[in-house]
Image (tube, grey):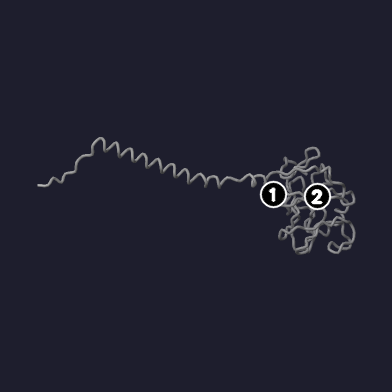
Amino acid sequence: MTDNSVSEPTVEDQKRRRFLTGITAGFGAVGGAIAVTPFALSMMPSERAKNAGAPVQYDYSKIQPGAMVKVEWRGKPVVLLNRTEEMMLGLEEIESNLADPTSLVSVQPPYAQNDARADVSKPEMLVMLGVCTHLGCSPVEKLAIGPDPEMGDDSQGGFFCPCHGSKFDLSGRVYLNVPATSNMEIPPYQYEGDIITIGKDTERVA
C-alpha cells in the first residue's frame, strides 16, 4: 500500500523558508523606495521656481524724476516710475474720466489705495505690474503731458495698451469706456534705504 501522508517540514526547511521570505520582502522595500524617491523629488519646487517667486530688489535712487525702468518679478514686468510734480498734479485733473478713481475694485496693498496708488512715504514713486487688466498685454508708457494720438488731446500722461486700446493714467487707473474694467495691479513692496523690495512688505496703511 502506498503511503500518501505528507511529511512535516524539517527545522532546516523552516529556516530556509524564513530566509527566502526575508530576502523577497527586502527587495520589495528597496524597489519601492527607488520608485518613490524620483516621484517625491518631482513634487519639490526647483531652485529656478523658488527664485522666480522670490522678492526682487532695485536701487530706486538711480531713477531720475520723470524716468521709468522695468524689472521682472514672478515672470511679469514691474514698472518703476519716478513721477514729477507736474505728473502728480495731473492725476487730480482727470478723475472724472476714470472708471475707478479711488481704486475700490482694483488690486493693490492697503497702503497704495490712494490717488497716487503708492506708499505715502514716497508718493511720487509708482510701483506697478506692467500688465493690462483686460487680456494681459503690456501697455506702452506715454509719459509726456500733452496731445497724444492714443491718449487724447488733453493727455496727462499714462499707459496705452496697443492690443485693444485700453488707457490708464500715470497711477495705472483705468479710463472709462475702454475694454479693461479695473486698474493695473500694484504688487506688495517696501523701502529699505535706497532699495525697493518688490514682493515683500510689512503691514502698513495708506
82 displayed left or right of 110: right
Percent position of residue 47, x then y: 63, 44
64 displayed left or right of 204: right
Q: Is residue 17 depicted above or below 169 in this figure?
A: above
Q: Is residue 18 depicted above or below 179 in this figure?
A: above
Of residue 135 and residue 47, the one placed in the foreground of this image is 47
Question: Which quadrant: the C terminus?
Answer: top right
User: SS class of the residue under badge 2?
Assistant: strand
Of residue 108 and residue 103, the one placed in the foreground of this image is 108
Query: Of the residues under marks 2 and 1, which one precedes in the sequence?
Result: 2
Give the label on residue 69, or none.
2
Percent position of residue 36, x then y: 49, 45
Residue drawn at (56%, 47%) of the image: 43
**Quarter of the rendering containing residue 27:** top left
Amino acid type at circle 2 is Val
Give the label on residue 74, or none.
1
User: SS class of the residue under badge 1?
Assistant: loop
Of residue 136 and residue 86, the one placed in the foreground of this image is 136
160 displayed left or right of 55: right
Amino acid type at circle 1 is Arg
